[in-house]
Amino acid sequence: MTSLTELQRLLEIMARLRNPDGGCPWDLAQNFRTIAPYTIEEAYEVSEAAEANDIPALKDELGDLLLQVVFHSQMAEEAGLFNFGDVARSINDKMIRRHPHVFATAEVDSAAATIDAWEAQKATERAAKGASSALDGVGAAMPALTRAVKLQRRAARVGFDWPDAEPVFDKIDEEIAEVREAMTEGAERIEDEIGDLLFAVVNLARKLDIDPEQALRGGSRKFERRFRQVETQLAAKGKAPGSATLDEMESEWTNAKRAEKNVGD
Protein backbone atom coordinates (compact mmCIF):
# COMPACT_ATOMS: atom_id res chain seq x y z
CA MET A 1 0.00 0.00 0.00
CA THR A 2 1.11 3.56 -0.61
CA SER A 3 1.85 5.92 2.25
CA LEU A 4 -1.32 7.90 1.57
CA THR A 5 -3.41 4.72 1.56
CA GLU A 6 -1.96 3.68 4.92
CA LEU A 7 -2.59 7.14 6.33
CA GLN A 8 -6.20 7.01 5.21
CA ARG A 9 -6.47 3.56 6.82
CA LEU A 10 -5.17 4.99 10.11
CA LEU A 11 -7.69 7.85 9.96
CA GLU A 12 -10.48 5.34 9.42
CA ILE A 13 -9.27 3.15 12.31
CA MET A 14 -9.25 6.17 14.64
CA ALA A 15 -12.74 7.19 13.52
CA ARG A 16 -13.94 3.65 14.21
CA LEU A 17 -12.38 3.66 17.69
CA ARG A 18 -14.13 6.95 18.48
CA ASN A 19 -17.49 5.91 17.05
CA PRO A 20 -20.12 5.94 19.84
CA ASP A 21 -21.77 3.01 18.08
CA GLY A 22 -19.39 0.11 18.79
CA GLY A 23 -16.19 2.06 19.36
CA CYS A 24 -13.65 1.58 22.14
CA PRO A 25 -14.89 2.79 25.56
CA TRP A 26 -11.40 3.98 26.56
CA ASP A 27 -10.83 5.96 23.35
CA LEU A 28 -14.31 7.47 23.61
CA ALA A 29 -13.61 8.66 27.16
CA GLN A 30 -10.55 10.71 26.15
CA ASN A 31 -10.21 14.42 25.44
CA PHE A 32 -7.38 16.78 24.47
CA ARG A 33 -6.22 17.15 28.07
CA THR A 34 -6.19 13.45 28.92
CA ILE A 35 -4.39 12.47 25.71
CA ALA A 36 -1.70 15.17 25.93
CA PRO A 37 0.51 13.23 28.41
CA TYR A 38 0.57 10.27 26.02
CA THR A 39 1.58 12.59 23.18
CA ILE A 40 4.52 13.85 25.24
CA GLU A 41 5.48 10.31 26.24
CA GLU A 42 5.50 9.14 22.62
CA ALA A 43 7.70 12.07 21.57
CA TYR A 44 10.23 11.08 24.23
CA GLU A 45 10.16 7.48 23.03
CA VAL A 46 10.89 8.66 19.48
CA SER A 47 13.86 10.60 20.85
CA GLU A 48 15.10 7.57 22.79
CA ALA A 49 14.94 5.32 19.74
CA ALA A 50 16.74 7.91 17.62
CA GLU A 51 19.52 8.35 20.18
CA ALA A 52 19.98 4.58 20.36
CA ASN A 53 19.94 4.39 16.54
CA ASP A 54 17.37 1.61 16.94
CA ILE A 55 15.75 1.84 13.52
CA PRO A 56 12.98 -0.77 14.04
CA ALA A 57 12.03 0.94 17.32
CA LEU A 58 12.17 4.35 15.64
CA LYS A 59 9.71 3.17 12.99
CA ASP A 60 7.32 1.87 15.66
CA GLU A 61 7.61 4.93 17.88
CA LEU A 62 7.02 7.30 14.96
CA GLY A 63 3.84 5.34 14.28
CA ASP A 64 2.78 5.79 17.90
CA LEU A 65 3.47 9.53 17.64
CA LEU A 66 1.52 9.78 14.39
CA LEU A 67 -1.40 8.09 16.13
CA GLN A 68 -1.38 10.90 18.68
CA VAL A 69 -1.73 13.51 15.92
CA VAL A 70 -4.56 11.52 14.37
CA PHE A 71 -6.24 11.09 17.78
CA HIS A 72 -6.21 14.85 18.49
CA SER A 73 -7.42 15.58 14.95
CA GLN A 74 -10.30 13.11 15.24
CA MET A 75 -11.49 14.67 18.51
CA ALA A 76 -11.23 18.14 16.97
CA GLU A 77 -13.23 17.04 13.93
CA GLU A 78 -15.96 15.63 16.16
CA ALA A 79 -16.15 19.00 17.92
CA GLY A 80 -16.31 20.89 14.62
CA LEU A 81 -12.96 22.62 15.24
CA PHE A 82 -10.62 21.26 12.56
CA ASN A 83 -9.64 17.95 10.98
CA PHE A 84 -6.47 16.11 9.99
CA GLY A 85 -6.47 17.78 6.58
CA ASP A 86 -6.42 21.18 8.28
CA VAL A 87 -3.46 20.08 10.41
CA ALA A 88 -1.53 18.88 7.35
CA ARG A 89 -2.42 22.03 5.41
CA SER A 90 -1.22 24.20 8.26
CA ILE A 91 2.22 22.60 8.42
CA ASN A 92 2.50 22.49 4.62
CA ASP A 93 1.81 26.21 4.38
CA LYS A 94 4.20 26.93 7.26
CA MET A 95 7.07 24.95 5.72
CA ILE A 96 6.68 26.72 2.38
CA ARG A 97 6.42 30.11 4.10
CA ARG A 98 9.55 29.50 6.19
CA HIS A 99 11.64 28.20 3.27
CA PRO A 100 11.47 31.01 0.71
CA HIS A 101 14.99 30.04 -0.42
CA VAL A 102 13.53 26.71 -1.60
CA PHE A 103 9.99 27.57 -2.69
CA ALA A 104 10.43 31.22 -3.71
CA THR A 105 13.21 33.54 -4.82
CA ALA A 106 15.05 34.26 -1.56
CA GLU A 107 18.68 33.14 -1.33
CA VAL A 108 20.76 31.87 1.59
CA ASP A 109 24.38 30.75 1.41
CA SER A 110 24.82 28.63 4.55
CA ALA A 111 23.04 26.56 7.17
CA ALA A 112 23.49 29.41 9.67
CA ALA A 113 21.85 31.86 7.27
CA THR A 114 18.98 29.42 6.82
CA ILE A 115 18.41 29.35 10.59
CA ASP A 116 18.52 33.16 10.74
CA ALA A 117 15.93 33.41 7.96
CA TRP A 118 13.76 30.78 9.68
CA GLU A 119 13.85 32.67 12.97
CA ALA A 120 13.14 35.99 11.26
CA GLN A 121 10.06 34.48 9.62
CA LYS A 122 8.90 33.05 12.95
CA ALA A 123 9.33 36.47 14.56
CA THR A 124 7.23 38.03 11.80
CA GLU A 125 4.52 35.42 12.36
CA ARG A 126 4.53 36.04 16.13
CA ALA A 127 4.25 39.79 15.58
CA ALA A 128 1.30 39.24 13.24
CA LYS A 129 -0.40 37.34 16.07
CA GLY A 130 0.08 40.29 18.42
CA ALA A 131 3.24 39.21 20.26
CA SER A 132 4.65 42.09 22.30
CA SER A 133 7.74 40.41 23.79
CA ALA A 134 10.71 38.59 22.31
CA LEU A 135 9.81 35.78 24.72
CA ASP A 136 6.20 35.35 23.60
CA GLY A 137 5.37 31.88 22.33
CA VAL A 138 7.92 29.92 24.36
CA GLY A 139 5.79 27.06 25.66
CA ALA A 140 5.47 26.76 29.43
CA ALA A 141 4.91 22.99 29.35
CA MET A 142 8.18 21.95 27.69
CA PRO A 143 11.01 20.40 29.76
CA ALA A 144 12.64 22.99 31.99
CA LEU A 145 16.12 22.74 30.48
CA THR A 146 14.77 23.00 26.94
CA ARG A 147 12.59 25.96 27.86
CA ALA A 148 15.55 27.72 29.49
CA VAL A 149 17.55 27.38 26.27
CA LYS A 150 14.70 28.78 24.18
CA LEU A 151 14.24 31.74 26.52
CA GLN A 152 17.97 32.47 26.41
CA ARG A 153 18.10 32.21 22.62
CA ARG A 154 15.17 34.56 22.24
CA ALA A 155 16.84 37.12 24.51
CA ALA A 156 20.13 36.66 22.64
CA ARG A 157 18.51 37.52 19.32
CA VAL A 158 17.72 41.00 20.59
CA GLY A 159 21.23 41.49 22.00
CA PHE A 160 20.79 40.35 25.62
CA ASP A 161 23.64 37.86 25.79
CA TRP A 162 27.25 37.40 26.78
CA PRO A 163 29.78 37.72 23.93
CA ASP A 164 31.25 34.25 24.64
CA ALA A 165 31.27 31.45 27.23
CA GLU A 166 33.96 32.86 29.53
CA PRO A 167 31.80 35.31 31.54
CA VAL A 168 29.31 32.51 32.20
CA PHE A 169 31.85 30.74 34.41
CA ASP A 170 31.93 33.81 36.66
CA LYS A 171 28.13 33.80 36.74
CA ILE A 172 28.11 30.11 37.75
CA ASP A 173 30.60 30.83 40.55
CA GLU A 174 28.37 33.69 41.72
CA GLU A 175 25.29 31.45 41.74
CA ILE A 176 27.11 28.71 43.67
CA ALA A 177 28.05 31.26 46.31
CA GLU A 178 24.42 32.37 46.54
CA VAL A 179 23.29 28.76 46.98
CA ARG A 180 25.72 28.39 49.88
CA GLU A 181 24.39 31.59 51.42
CA ALA A 182 20.79 30.45 50.96
CA MET A 183 21.44 27.24 52.89
CA THR A 184 20.99 29.22 56.12
CA GLU A 185 17.72 30.82 54.98
CA GLY A 186 15.30 27.98 54.28
CA ALA A 187 14.06 25.73 51.47
CA GLU A 188 12.25 28.41 49.44
CA ARG A 189 15.38 30.56 49.07
CA ILE A 190 17.51 27.48 48.33
CA GLU A 191 15.13 26.40 45.57
CA ASP A 192 15.23 29.88 44.07
CA GLU A 193 19.03 29.97 44.03
CA ILE A 194 19.34 26.41 42.72
CA GLY A 195 17.07 27.49 39.86
CA ASP A 196 19.40 30.43 39.10
CA LEU A 197 22.41 28.09 39.18
CA LEU A 198 20.79 25.63 36.77
CA PHE A 199 19.80 28.48 34.48
CA ALA A 200 23.42 29.68 34.43
CA VAL A 201 24.68 26.17 33.62
CA VAL A 202 22.18 25.98 30.76
CA ASN A 203 23.58 29.29 29.52
CA LEU A 204 27.09 27.80 29.54
CA ALA A 205 25.90 24.78 27.56
CA ARG A 206 24.18 27.06 25.04
CA LYS A 207 27.28 29.20 24.58
CA LEU A 208 29.30 26.01 23.95
CA ASP A 209 26.68 24.73 21.44
CA ILE A 210 25.71 21.82 23.68
CA ASP A 211 22.10 20.72 24.18
CA PRO A 212 21.77 20.62 28.00
CA GLU A 213 18.81 18.24 27.84
CA GLN A 214 20.82 15.76 25.81
CA ALA A 215 23.91 16.29 27.97
CA LEU A 216 21.94 15.58 31.16
CA ARG A 217 20.35 12.48 29.65
CA GLY A 218 23.85 11.29 28.79
CA GLY A 219 25.03 12.03 32.32
CA SER A 220 22.08 10.12 33.75
CA ARG A 221 22.77 7.12 31.51
CA LYS A 222 26.41 7.19 32.61
CA PHE A 223 25.42 7.30 36.28
CA GLU A 224 22.99 4.42 35.82
CA ARG A 225 25.55 2.32 33.98
CA ARG A 226 28.25 2.87 36.60
CA PHE A 227 25.95 2.39 39.58
CA ARG A 228 24.69 -0.89 38.17
CA GLN A 229 28.33 -1.96 37.87
CA VAL A 230 28.86 -1.00 41.52
CA GLU A 231 25.90 -3.20 42.46
CA THR A 232 27.26 -6.08 40.39
CA GLN A 233 30.70 -5.87 41.97
CA LEU A 234 29.28 -5.65 45.48
CA ALA A 235 27.01 -8.62 44.82
CA ALA A 236 30.05 -10.66 43.78
CA LYS A 237 31.37 -9.99 47.29
CA GLY A 238 28.08 -10.96 48.93
CA LYS A 239 27.05 -7.36 49.60
CA ALA A 240 24.42 -4.85 48.49
CA PRO A 241 24.63 -1.03 48.41
CA GLY A 242 22.53 -0.81 51.56
CA SER A 243 24.98 -2.93 53.53
CA ALA A 244 28.22 -1.59 52.05
CA THR A 245 30.09 1.44 53.37
CA LEU A 246 30.37 4.63 51.35
CA ASP A 247 34.11 4.01 50.97
CA GLU A 248 33.42 0.57 49.51
CA MET A 249 30.91 1.96 47.05
CA GLU A 250 33.25 4.83 46.09
CA SER A 251 36.00 2.29 45.43
CA GLU A 252 33.77 0.26 43.12
CA TRP A 253 32.60 3.46 41.43
CA THR A 254 36.23 4.38 40.72
CA ASN A 255 36.81 0.89 39.34
CA ALA A 256 33.78 1.25 37.05
CA LYS A 257 35.07 4.60 35.75
CA ARG A 258 38.53 3.16 35.18
CA ALA A 259 37.11 0.18 33.32
CA GLU A 260 35.14 2.46 30.99
CA LYS A 261 38.24 4.55 30.31
CA ASN A 262 40.25 1.44 29.47
CA VAL A 263 37.55 0.30 27.04
CA GLY A 264 37.61 3.76 25.44
CA ASP A 265 41.40 3.61 25.08
Image (cartoon, rainbow, N blue to C red):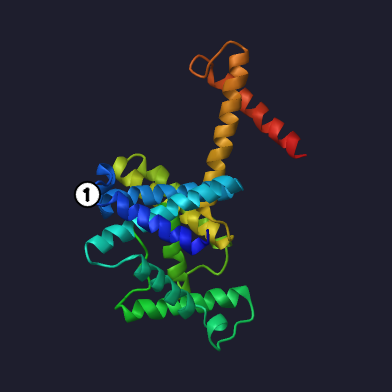
Residue 129 falls in which quadrant of the image? Answer: bottom left
Residue at 47% x, 70% y is 156
Q: Does the image show residue 43?
A: no
Position of residue 187 relative to residue 7, above or below, is above
x, y (%) of residue 86?
35, 70
The quadrant of the rendering that contains the C terminus is: top right
x, y (%) of residue 106?
55, 87
Q: Nearer the viewer, residue 155 or 262?
A: 262
Query: Hey, which residue is sitting farthest right in the picture?
Result: 265
Q: Residue tagged by mark 1?
A: 21
Q: Does the image show residue 92?
A: yes
Residue at 65% x, 29% y is 256
Position of residue 139 relative to residue 35, above or below, is below
Amino acid at pointer 1: Asp
Q: Is residue 193 left or right of residue 107?
A: left
Query: Hey, which residue is sitting farthest top in the picture?
Result: 238
